[in-house]
Image (cartoon, coloured by chain):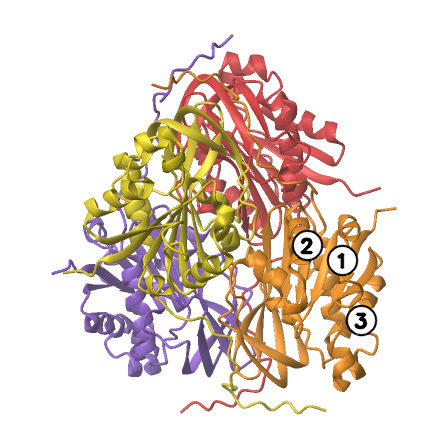
Chain colours: A orange, B yellow, C purple, D red
Amino acid sequence: MEKKINVVVWNEFRHEKLNEKCRAVYPNGIHSAIAEGLNADGAFNVECAWLDKDDEHGLSQELLDRTDVLMWWGHRAHPEVKDEIVERVQKRVLEGMGLIVLHSGHKSKIFMKLMGTTCNLKWRQVGERERIWTIEPAHPIVAGLPECFTLPHTEMYGERFDIPTPKDVVFITWYEGGEVFRSGVTFERGYGRIFYFAPGHETYPIFYDPNIRRVIANAAKWAAPRIIREIPCPKVPPQEEIHTKLD
Amino acid sequence: MEKKINVVVWNEFRHEKLNEKCRAVYPNGIHSAIAEGLNADGAFNVECAWLDKDDEHGLSQELLDRTDVLMWWGHRAHPEVKDEIVERVQKRVLEGMGLIVLHSGHKSKIFMKLMGTTCNLKWRQVGERERIWTIEPAHPIVAGLPECFTLPHTEMYGERFDIPTPKDVVFITWYEGGEVFRSGVTFERGYGRIFYFAPGHETYPIFYDPNIRRVIANAAKWAAPRIIREIPCPKVPPQEEIHTKLD
Amino acid sequence: MEKKINVVVWNEFRHEKLNEKCRAVYPNGIHSAIAEGLNADGAFNVECAWLDKDDEHGLSQELLDRTDVLMWWGHRAHPEVKDEIVERVQKRVLEGMGLIVLHSGHKSKIFMKLMGTTCNLKWRQVGERERIWTIEPAHPIVAGLPECFTLPHTEMYGERFDIPTPKDVVFITWYEGGEVFRSGVTFERGYGRIFYFAPGHETYPIFYDPNIRRVIANAAKWAAPRIIREIPCPKVPPQEEIHTKLD
Amino acid sequence: MEKKINVVVWNEFRHEKLNEKCRAVYPNGIHSAIAEGLNADGAFNVECAWLDKDDEHGLSQELLDRTDVLMWWGHRAHPEVKDEIVERVQKRVLEGMGLIVLHSGHKSKIFMKLMGTTCNLKWRQVGERERIWTIEPAHPIVAGLPECFTLPHTEMYGERFDIPTPKDVVFITWYEGGEVFRSGVTFERGYGRIFYFAPGHETYPIFYDPNIRRVIANAAKWAAPRIIREIPCPKVPPQEEIHTKLD
């Protein structure tokens, strides 16, 4: 039996308490809907964590040390995430853990820290239609998906998206209102893989959509660690005899 | 007459005071040697700044606002650079200012912040020979250079260098002791251009070398802003009429 | 006075003779409309060539040797372009000449030869609206352009576009019919720069559009040679003494 | 039991007949040594083919249709490979088959056709030492390898290597004679993956080296098809109602 991939779904879990519409769609939290989709796949051990779970936002070093892939959904409380926890997550990503950043996580401390840019974009929340196009048909993240699929209601995230040039632009989105967006993009930082995926507004049932669940499960498999290793900065002896004499 | 490019050469300027060998090579500071090389080119207005110049490390907002390209040499005092100044520089880079990071600046707060990685590498300081090979002959940073050139004495910086995949690997270095290094690499972040260049240990006269000066002057021209503009995150109206009705 | 950039606009020039609609829009040929736009800029010396101009399709070695940037519009007669002329152009591109490939030139022999892929895409010709979004605001090809602009009638070219990952995705297009396209993409091959730009169907007045003309003029400046040089495959002596003894 | 990967090792197989030194090292042909290494891994079904095997160079359509990964070693007889066979292989690579190009295969028709460039480089054949450094420690192609390893005798292939910017620079080589080389580089074209690996001169026992065999087996696993699919160029109906009226 193949070893399961340990996934932690991290959710800010505030909108669900403050916003009735959000609670109606995600009564047990966005994380529960995502976890449900991952559990249906069968390849994962799934745990959940959230901002107010404990004084480490549920992200103890012990948990991270056994996490293969971390998912991140946050929005209104980005500034409340403690810097020391962000640094802990960044270190683990660089050492090999996968990171899937969802929707408004584009402005999370962890994503901005790994990108080095503002991650700004255009936005509009009127419930328009979104069509997601596959740009890299051979990429494992699109396995089993049609060449395009639609979401009936979405928040618009539009270009210019201020990110470094991605490793792969896996998806580009078409919006009813006239914008486009690189809605699925990959990065590698240190030994870790990162996938940003744009859909996922808190008042639409996007994380119940079968295609969206397929993307997220594929991404978690793709982002699972290839190696997990510290990144040293060693002083090393020469490999070859050095003939140069200093004056 | 073409407009000159405003360059600020920032140097930590501590080794020169603490280390006799360094002072012997750079009696007026590493920044002065770099500035001298840039002034000889004729395309630049050059100013210098350093860690202890004033309580903003010589990097006032007013100065940055009129700087086209910032050069950065630092080493032992990286932690003393104030976070607010680092954020100020990062913002300006993302808005279009060029940044040239030299040698041990690979572990500076500003470079690590823009890269999102540890920027770790292997190192050895025995004064061995280095040969720098041009990998991209058409890149403006190599204009006027031979296909390879040597430095008689250098500090070794070896792979694995923990950086994001560069936009261009402009130079790869061969070391006498048996290592290799991507010694000249470019990045784009926000609207700004970044060049990291490895040579430049404080006790060798590397910044007087004509080829090194050619690289640095070329890099400053290449990194000069194409645009300077704030990066917004605007809520925008649709471009097309939206027909979707929310339930 | 700055030296002008020598541009050759190459056009198949067959549709204009066979298709009344095309002739109505481009009575002197598509090349003439493109040349007119370039001439208005003032930075270029413009010549035109076409498939039936002479038995070298107007692309003598002598002409190529003094050409900085070649533009290519072709469609129905791609197979009639002689292989030896294609190889001549490819050699010149690799040695540093810029190449701008327009619209249906995506299936030209020269573009496919430089890409190594099929360059296939989806298409539809119903005269729908196209909106072109700037993805890289600092790229010289977008200088002076708004963040998006529209073409009232266009042929749809949609993803998946079978090209190697571009150096830069400069533009992404939104189509009224629901598709997206990486409509402005850059490549570097050898010492030469290549820009593919999707708009330009032969029965729409796209090459008279001021924004389109701005893109094409910007692209020609961006693609102008940085160096022009043969690409050798030399046997070379060692740079360092070799101590290894063969058994 | 996991399905085995079908690998075809293609070898020009001329040097072994014409050059006594080569025959002494590879009495059954270079392909046999490569196949032996792959068979020892256990993950592959291995077949061999060569230039003079039959009038299709052993590469029938039927064989290619069931090949997951093709390896290519050629040198003196590159021009004798028939263009129609090269086109057949290119088509299959674009549709998803992996391709591993070894050593002097850099000037093969198939590699040049997929790259679009000259693939020229510097070279020298004096039997010097080569040290291969891992640049991407998390890449599957380096699994199980030390961070560097040496070959006691090698042919030097040096930069500038005229290839498109690779997807990943997996290895960089240090040569005793003072050059460097991007000796292990990946590309994606169409749906297929391509790996070029520099070591492998015909008179050295490089393909018996355990580290080299590890690289080649890893590369074959990495390059195995993710999908196999034709690349269409379809005329498609709109996804959305089109309101634009042509004049």
* Residue D148, picture quadrant: top right
Q: Secondary structure at mark 3?
A: helix
Q: Earlier in the sequence, mark 2 or mark 1?
A: 1
Comparing B53 with D77, the one in front is: B53
Q: Residues within 10 Å of mark 3 (few under 14, many from 20)?
A: many
Q: CA distance from mark 3 to mark 1?
A: 20 Å
Q: Residues within 10 Å of mark 2 (few under 14, many from 20)?
A: many
Q: CA distance from mark 2 to mark 1?
A: 8 Å
> Image quadrant for the N terminus of chain B?
bottom left
Residue located at (85% from left, 58% from top)? A42
- Which label is found at residue B43? none
User: In this image, A154 relative to C106: left or right?
Assistant: right
Pointer 2 with pointer 1, Cβ within 8 A: yes
Task: Answer yes or no: are tags 2 and 3 on the same subunit.
Answer: yes
Q: Where is residue D163 shown, x and y percent of the image? A: 43, 43
Q: Where is residue C108 shown, x and y percent of the image? A: 40, 60
Q: Secondary structure at mark 2?
A: helix
Q: Chain of mark 2?
A: A
- Which label is found at residue A33? 3
Amino acid marked by disc 3: Ala
Q: Earlier in the sequence, mark 2 or mark 3?
A: 3
User: In this image, A123 relative to B111: left or right?
Assistant: right
